[in-house]
Image: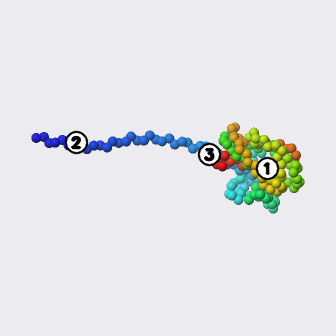
Amino acid sequence: MTAPVTPAPAVPAIAAPAAPVATPAPAATLPSVHIKAGLSSSFTNVDGVIWLADQGFEGGDTVDRGDDLQIDNTKSPALYRTEHYGMTAFSYPVPNGNYIVKLHFAETYDAITAAGERVFSFNVEGKDFKDFDVLVKAGGPRRAYIESIPVEVTDGKLDITFTANIENPEINGIEILPASNL
């Protein structure tokens, strides 16, 4: 008599390894740039943001009004106590992309006391601002004012041109912020 045949135990099927899932490459992170016009060293504001020293300007000069100058409409008055004035252009290398450019102004020159005494034009990446009067925009002297401009950089640098109309153009700070972070 033959012994009954016992079937071999079933071997569980081994699943084929899953194909690796492609992880998309992270999008290039655009930099945030903060430049304090008129200052020869970096500056940290009350929010802990580090501002680079004055750079990127073509022409003009700088002035420091001193620590005792009162500036209204800001929690960082020190940002507005130095300025770059009389410049014709500003350029800063950044990766191509969409940015919000924030231009910081305050009329701190004692000889400017009324509307129309300092008027200039500027162009930020093709966007024109004609007959800009800091004193009018800020609502008076020694008051901070920020002009925010959305731009697209396509040539690897942010460009601003300045044109004097009455008196010299002036600026206290420039921020270049990635539009995707706002």
Name the residue nearer the viewer: 149 or 85. Answer: 149
Compared to residue 159, the image places residue 52 above or below, namely below
Q: Which of the image's four quarters has the N terminus?
A: top left
Question: Mark 2 or 3 closer to N-term?
Answer: 2
Amino acid type at circle 3 is Thr
Q: Position of residue 70 (x, y in %)?
A: 80, 60
Report the coloring of the rendering. Answer: rainbow
Residue at position x 69%, y 54% from top? 50
Q: CA distance from mark 3 to mark 1?
A: 27 Å
Residue position marked by numbered label 1 in the rendering = 171
Q: Is residue 78 visible?
A: no
Q: Residues within 10 Å of mark 3 (few under 14, many from 20)?
A: few
Q: Quadrant of residue 92?
A: top right
Amino acid type at circle 1 is Ile
From the viewer's perspective, is 117 left or right of 19? right
Q: Position of residue 81 (x, y in %)?
A: 79, 56
Q: Quadrant of residue 56?
A: top right
Name the residue nearer the viewer: 180 or 174. Answer: 180
From the viewer's perspective, is 114 left or right of 127? right
Residue position marked by numbered label 3 in the rendering = 29
Compared to residue 145, the image places residue 26 above or below, namely above
Q: Is residue 153 visible?
A: yes
Residue at position x 35%, y 42% from top? 14
